[in-house]
Image: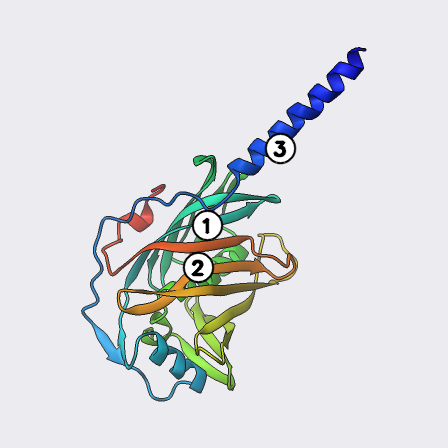
Amino acid sequence: MFLRLIIPAFVVILAGIMAVRWIGLRGNGQSFPAYPASTTLPDSMPLPPDLPAPVHRFYQTIIGNQIPIIHSAVLTLSGRLRFMGITFPARMRFTHEAGRNYRHYIEATVFGQPVMKVNESYLDGHGRMELPVGTIQDEPKIDAAANLGLWGESLWLPTIFITDPRVRWEAIDAQTARLIVPFADTGSDSFTVQFDAATGLIHSMETRRWRDAHDAAKLGWRIEPLDWTRWHGMLIPSTAAVTWLDEGTPWLVATADDVVYNADVSAYIRGRGL
C-alpha cells in the first residue's frame, strides 16, 4: 500500500520539478541596463577601392563609401548560453578596445535570477577566464583562442576589419574571402568569411580555434549572423549564433540590446562584473 501511494506522489513531484526547470529556462535573459555613455563617430576614412569584390560590396551595403573609425565598443546583449549540456537564458556585457582588448561579463539565469557569473578578459595579449569550475590563465592556447574571439566578436564593430592597418583581406571567390588578423607581436590568424549572394552581408565567419587549454588539436568554430539591424547609421548583426562545429548546434545565441561606440572604456575594461 505504501508503494502504491508513494510512487504516484514521486512522479507528480518529479514532473513538477521538470516543469519548473523548463519554465525557468525559457527565453532569453533579461538584458542589463544600457551602458551609460553616448556614441561618437567623429572620424572616418574612404572605403578602399582594392578590397576583394564581396568585401567591397559588404561595406557599401552596411555603411556606404565613408567608413567610421571605431576605437571602442560596449555591447549589451541577451540570449541563450549552453553550459555543461544545459541551455540557460543569459545576459552579457562585452567591452572592446577595438582589435586590442576585451572584457566579458556574463550571467546565466533561471527565473531571471543569476545562477552563474562569468568574468573573462583578453588584456595585453593574455586571456583569463573566471568560470564556476575555476580560473584559467597563463595558458598559451587560451591566449590564442581569446584573440580569435576578439576578432570574431568584432563583427559587431565591423569597420575595424578595414580601418585597422594590421588587418588584411585576401580574395577566394565571388562569395568568399579570407580575413587575416594579427596575433601577438608578429603572428597572425585567419577566418574564412562567406558572404550572402543575395544581400551582400556576411553569412558566416569560420576558423579553427582551441576550445580548452589542454586540447590536442584546434576545432572548427563559427560565428553566424542570423539577422541585421541598424545602429548608429551602420548595419550590424542584431542576433548572432556561435557554434563549435563538432557540436553541431550553437552554444551561444546573442542579441544586441544596446551598442555604444567610442566611449572611454580604459578603466571599465580592466574591471570585473557589470
Give the SS element for disc 2. strand
* Labelled pair 1, 2 in contact (Cβ < 8 Å): yes
Res. 18 mark: 3
In three-dimensional space, the C-alpha distance between marks 3 and 1, rounded to whole angstroms, equals 22 Å
User: Label 1: how many residues lie within 10 Å, few (<14), some (14-19) or many (20+)?
Assistant: many
- The amino acid type of the residue labelled 2 equals Thr
Quick one: SS at disc 1? strand
Please state if 185 lies on the left or on the right of 269 as rendered.
right
Name the amino acid type tagged 3: Met
Tell me residue 130's x, y (percent): 47, 42
Q: Residue at image x 54%, y 57%?
A: 141
Single out the residue that lies furthest toward the top. 1
Position of residue 85 in the picture relative to residue 158 (left or right): right
The residue lying toward the viewer, choosing from 23 and 41, is 23
**Tag 1 residue:** 79
Q: Farthest residue toward the right? A: 1
From the viewer's side, name the closer residue of 19 and 180.
19
Which amino acid, by three-letter code, is at mark 1?
Gly
Q: In this view, does 6 lie to the left or right of 140?
A: right
Q: Look at the numbered disc 3 and give the secondary structure of its residue.
A: helix
265 or 216: which is nearer to us? 265
In the picture, residue 271 is in which quadrant? top left
Tell me where residue 142 appears, x and y as whole percent: 52, 55
The mark found on residue 178 in the picture is none
User: How many badges with numbers are in the image?
Assistant: 3
